[in-house]
């Protein structure tokens, strides 16, 4: 297909994508998730490390806007009071209705930096001094789940793209060189890629994570996980690119570039690999969920991001106890968000694949 047709096709992908209701819903959902983690300090009423041990496993705070005499009021909350029930031998939380704590929007709170460099202390909502508001309850250490989900999403939702920025350029260039030169070069390069593919990546990650020094910070673990995932994920992608290059290199515009004296690497990078972008876009949207799930699985097993740093995987670990599932369902929220994110990426990827499929376009 000539380059002009590829450009025209790629321009129409987004327009056709937003016409699909399911894909549009997935785009909106991902947009909300990523905007939430970008502006997490503004949306979160508490910092990631805030803890109140007196509110361990406190239920979600109820927000009221109607007074006891059924009149509209500013939003307010009541604090929970912790008590022990000698009959059931369980900790119970009851609202202390003797004092109201009003919710204030765009009010001052703890200081943070917008986008990492702009100092600010304005938050979407806060409560009066002495009040506590936990929209999704608290964990075993009395930390606000809503705030930690926002901060934890920064790791869980970005690890996929960070890994792709490493693996996809390597896979594209490796597959492009292999397919373009062919012959012994192709055979040797593909045997090496197949050797990489034969490595059981998930079990290797578990072994490596278990061997890591206990003193490593979560940032260092996070970086190492990204690098390992990236260097294990390029091989399968390179094989597909290689197959596409084998057919593209026979096109007339490639032969014309050779005739004009263009070098091999210039032809590969400037003329051949851009023709594979349609597949690359689909592959990216379908690969990100795998990286998200891998990080979440490792963190869930205690081999990824470590407490007190938050990720959706290690937050979900608390929900593995059936008692917590029955009596503290708010702890399952990270798992629900992982499901939503993966489903959204898959819906977008499938829709783009259908748009770019020649038979689908003919229909």
Image: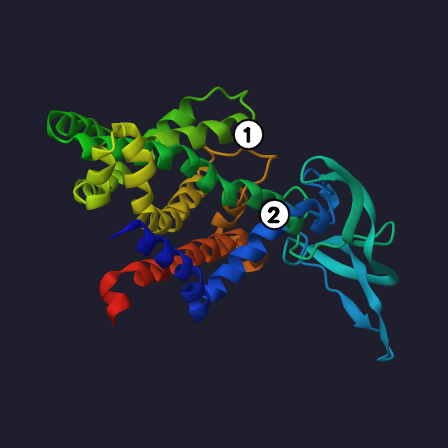
Foreground label between 1 and 2: 2
| Name of the residue lying farthest toward the bottom | 70
Please name whichever residue, 142 or 208, is drawn nearer the observer in this view of the structure: 208
| Name of the residue lying farthest toward the front | 260
User: Which residue is at 11% across, 25% downward?
Assistant: 184
* Residue labelled with disc 1: 218
- For label 2, count other residues whose C-alpha is less than 10 Å away and answer few (under 14), some (14-19) or many (20+): many
Instruction: In the rendered view, tell whether residue 72 sits above or below residue 254.
Output: below
User: Which residue is at 66% across, 41% downward?
Assistant: 141
Q: Is residue 199 left or right of residue 303?
A: left
* Residue labelled with disc 2: 37
Q: Earlier in the sequence, mark 1 or mark 2?
A: 2
Give the x, y percent position of residue 261. 25, 29
- For label 1, count other residues whose C-alpha is less than 10 Å away and answer few (under 14), some (14-19) or many (20+): some
Please name whichever residue, 278 or 238, is drawn nearer the observer in this view of the structure: 278
Instruction: In the rendered view, tell whether residue 119 sits above or below residue 149.
Output: above
Please name whichever residue, 36 or 20, is drawn nearer the observer in this view of the structure: 20
* Quarter of the figure with residue 97: bottom right
Give the x, y percent position of residue 315. 55, 44
* Quarter of the figure with residue 192: top left
Give the x, y percent position of residue 162. 47, 36
User: Which residue is at 36% across, 62% downward?
Assistant: 351
Please name whichever residue, 4 or 125, is drawn nearer the observer in this view of the structure: 4
Give the x, y percent position of residue 237. 28, 40
The colouring scheme, among rainbow, by chain, secondary structure or one colour, is rainbow
Q: Secondary structure at mark 1?
A: helix
* Quarter of the figure with residue 23: bottom left
């Amino acid at each position: 297909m000539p380059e002009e047709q590829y450009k025209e096709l790629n321009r129409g992908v987004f327009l056709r994508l937003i016409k699909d209701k399911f894909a549009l819903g997935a785009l909106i959902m991902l947009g909300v998730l990523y905007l939430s983690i970008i502006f997490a300090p503004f949306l979160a009423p508490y910092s990631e490390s805030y803890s109140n041990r007196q509110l361990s496993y406190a239920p979600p705070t109820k927000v009221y806007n109607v007074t006891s005499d059924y009149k509209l009021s500013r939003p307010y909350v009541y604090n929970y009071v912790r008590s022990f029930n000698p009959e059931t031998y369980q900790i119970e939380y009851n609202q202390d209705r003797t004092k109201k704590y009003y919710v204030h929007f765009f009010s001052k709170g703890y200081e943070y930096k917008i986008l990492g460099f702009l100092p600010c202390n304005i938050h979407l909502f806060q409560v009066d001094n002495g009040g506590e508001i936990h929209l999704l309850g608290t964990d075993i250490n009395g930390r606000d789940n809503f705030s930690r989900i926002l901060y934890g999403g920064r790791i869980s939702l970005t690890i996929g793209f960070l890994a792709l920025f490493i693996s996809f350029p390597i896979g594209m260039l490796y597959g492009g060189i292999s397919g373009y030169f062919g012959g012994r070069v192709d055979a040797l390069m593909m045997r090496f890629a197949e050797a990489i593919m034969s490595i059981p990546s998930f079990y290797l990650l578990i072994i490596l994570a278990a061997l890591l020094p206990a003193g490593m910070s979560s940032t260092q673990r996070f970086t190492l996980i990204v690098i390992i995932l990236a260097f294990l994920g390029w091989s399968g992608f390179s094989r597909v690119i290689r197959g596409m290059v084998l057919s593209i290199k026979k096109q007339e515009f490639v032969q014309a570039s050779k005739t004009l004296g263009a070098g091999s690497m210039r032809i590969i990078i400037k003329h051949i690999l851009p023709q594979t972008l349609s597949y690359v876009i689909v592959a990216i949207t379908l690969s990100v969920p795998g990286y998200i799930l891998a990080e979440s699985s490792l963190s869930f097993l205690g081999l990824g991001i470590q407490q007190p740093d938050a990720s959706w995987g290690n937050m979900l670990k608390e929900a593995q106890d059936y008692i917590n599932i029955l009596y503290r369902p708010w702890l399952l929220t990270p798992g629900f968000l992982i499901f939503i994110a993966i489903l959204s990426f898959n819906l977008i990827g499938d829709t783009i694949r259908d748009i770019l499929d020649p038979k689908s376009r003919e229909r």
